[in-house]
Image (cartoon, grey):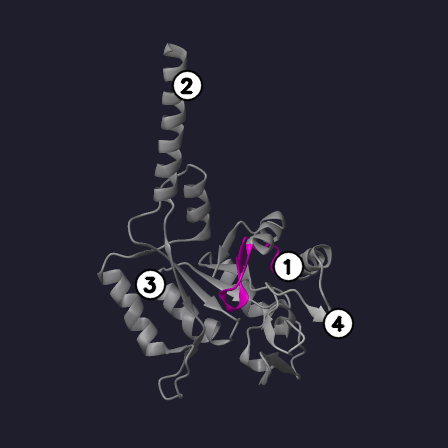
Amino acid sequence: MALLIRSLLAILLALAACLAAAADARFMALSYHEVIADDEKITPTAVRASDLARQFAWLQANDYHPVSVDQILAARNGGPPLPPKAILLTFDDGFKDAYTRVFPLLKLFGYPAVIALVGQWMDVPDDRMVDYDGEPVPRSKFLTWEQVREMQASGLVEVASHSYGLHRGILANPQGNTQPAATTRLYANGRYEDDAAYLARLRHDLRDSITQHTGKAPRIIVWPYGRSNQAAQEVAAELGMPIGLT
């Protein structure tokens, strides 16, 4: 009986330690996309640069603490806990304003942040158009790899994957509906993609297309449209991206 009690006590202590570690690694992610000039027309996914500056100032005045990916992973692995009101700042899609408008604010406040890049869009030649979810957008609206490397070298910016080519809808059924490519079984030639084909497509797409340009593999996957499933999460983790953001 004494042995059983000691064993149960050990299990409870281990569980308590795991729960405490999980609590110490809690954070809230704030997702941004376009950061536009004050005189530009606002869009559903945009924020004005002056408003972003005010939001950063508000976070600072109200004792919120933007944290880095290194801090999050260290806290998850039993290292120093994250501060109270921990925040992860993320900027999706790789718009050029991440360099021209966001980066200066990050340096001013000393805030770390994540930028999430779509590999397929980054690979478009300078004189071509990016297929931005069916809308043609000039390549010049997006970051260059030189700008990405400069931001990364500052120590403030972590480069994440936003997939290579999953930021699109694919045919999902015989009725012709499209759904997010990361979570949908492709319907083609009268049949649905099987498990093996689906997983192979995910592994091929989520392959690392960033290291060759930055020298550092991505550790975060930011899921297009915020959509993922267990299979996709497991594939991402196998490929070195243990943090997934929706």
SS class, disc 4: loop
Type of amino acid at the residue the image marks with label 2: Ser
Q: Mark 3 against mark 1, which lies toward the viewer?
A: 1
Q: CA distance from mark 3 to mark 2?
A: 49 Å
Query: Any mark on residue 206, and which?
Result: 1
Q: Is residue 68 above or below residue 43?
A: above
Query: Any mark on residue 7, and which?
Result: 2
Q: CA distance from mark 3 to mark 4?
A: 54 Å
Residue range (magenta): 214-229
Q: Earlier in the sequence, mark 4 or mark 2?
A: 2
Type of amino acid at the residue the image marks with label 1: Leu
Mark 3 = which residue?
109
Query: Any mark on residue 21, and which?
Result: none
SS class, disc 1: loop
| Contact flag, marks 3 and 1 (Cβ < 8 Å) | no
Which residue appears at 38% of the width and 11% of the height? Answer: 1
Q: Is residue 55 above or below residue 6?
A: below
Q: CA distance from mark 4 to mark 1?
A: 26 Å
Q: CA distance from mark 1 to mark 2?
A: 43 Å
Type of amino acid at the residue the image marks with label 4: Gly
| Contact flag, marks 3 and 2 (Cβ < 8 Å) | no
Type of amino acid at the residue the image marks with label 3: Phe
